Image (tube, rainbow, N blue to C red):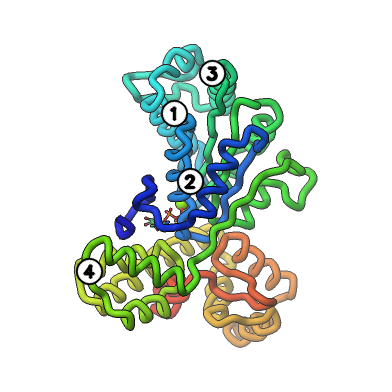
Amino acid sequence: MYFSLGVKERREDFYDMERELEMLVHELEDPLTRMIVIKGIRRVGKSSLLKVALSETKMPYLLMDLRAGGPLTPEEFYSYFADALSELLERNKRIERLLSRIKGIEIAGFKVELTEKRLFVVREVLDELDKWARDEKFRVIIALDEAQRLRFIRGFDKLLAHIYDYHNGLKLVLAGSEVGLLDKLLGKKDSETPLFGRAYAEIVIDRLSEEKARDFLSKGFRQVGLKVPDDEISDVISKIDGIIGWLTYYGYYRMRMSHSQAIERTLDEGARLAAGEFENFLSMRQIARRRYIEVLKILVRPSRWVDVKRGLRIALGMSISDKQISNYLSELVDYGFVAKVDGRYVVADQLLAEAILRGYIR
Ligand SMILES: Nc1ncnc2c1ncn2[C@@H]1O[C@H](COP(=O)(O)OP(=O)(O)OP(=O)(O)O)[C@@H](O)[C@H]1O
Ligand SMILES: [Mg+2]
């Protein structure tokens, strides 16, 4: 069923995206591919694509879900790592023997605990998984969802480059919604970064076109035997755009209430969620907080750089330097809150715009 909330794991719950899915499965299986990067703004279906592909290939995988949010603390990181390892162990009981060799790890049933929360333990686990893969003549996928957050973990970028260069039994998959930051981790423009210059396969997920969004909703309603008039579907798409995560929300609520209630619920919850994510971003930028909010207010409509500058001067009653304005805009783009389309900047997600209009970010 398309209209269930949460990350999709099974192909039958996963709408279309055939091309992306085929490409990902192909790259996962291709022995020459060392690293795959999945990009796309929030809620376009990156995690679902990743999970469905992993379950299709049947290859063993360690999937770390780093969840977008504020700065990733070492505590969180090691707890996500232990979770991922526990899940891998549950799927492949045979690795217990190989994990038990590692100092700094304890295993109780399927539960892995790190008694030493240090990067060298992670490195040793990866060494063992690499050996396992080579012995068995397969590859183990190391999948890192919201991988850009790993930049908060000192030394992890070097570890990634090390895996890439020396651990042929492992294959890396990095996914992320804060695309500019993911590019930074990958060292796209900076030759000083450890991963600089490493080739990778890139899969970009975009929002659905109007036609596809319509098709997604129609098929989803057909699955649950609900007749929804075309004009209601047009109304949803015009209000929330083609981001599949929001369309799924709407479908979920529409099964339970009227169109207008379902739309309002989607807009309101979506706006609150988007506001929360933006608050996370602002929490690290308290001094410039007011300015970022004013920039977003301007960018509810597509605007050129000069419009932002003028708008900010009016809103704040003071002139901001060109350098600072460029910096605010590039940060917003890097974090995926703003997109640059044909030379104009605009809030990337209609529901973030909604959050501003509703005064949820102030
Ligand atoms: N192809 C799909 N078919 C059906 N539902 C989907 C599909 N892709 C995503 N969804 C739904 O959209 C929502 C967002 O999906 P998912 O979490 O996979 O996206 P994401 O890009 O990883 O989001 P985030 O940026 O929040 O991590 C979920 O409710 C999921 O069920
Ligand atoms: Mg995700």
Q: Which residue is mark 3?
A: 136
Q: Which residue is mark 4?
A: 226
| Picture quadrant of residue 90 | top left
Rendering coords of residue 282 (x, y %):
52, 63
Residue placed under numbered mark 1 in the picture: 85
Residue at the disc numbered 2: 50
Query: Which amino acid type is marked by label 4?
Result: Leu
Give whichever of discs 4 and 2 has the lower sequence position.
2
Q: Secondary structure at mark 2?
A: helix
Whichever of callouts 2 and 1 sits on the residue coming sooner in the sequence is 2
Q: Residue at x 53, y 54 (%)?
A: 19
Look at 48% across and 19% down and name the residue there: 104
Give the alpha-carbon distance from disc 1 to disc 3, as whole Å.
19 Å
Quarter placement of the C terminus: bottom left
Q: Residue at x 47, y 75 (%)?
A: 353
Task: Measuring from the top left, give residue 222's x and y in whole percent.
Answer: 27, 65
Q: Hey, what amino acid is under mark 1?
A: Leu
Mark 3 C-beta closer than 8 Å to ligand 2? no
Q: Is residue 131 in view?
A: yes
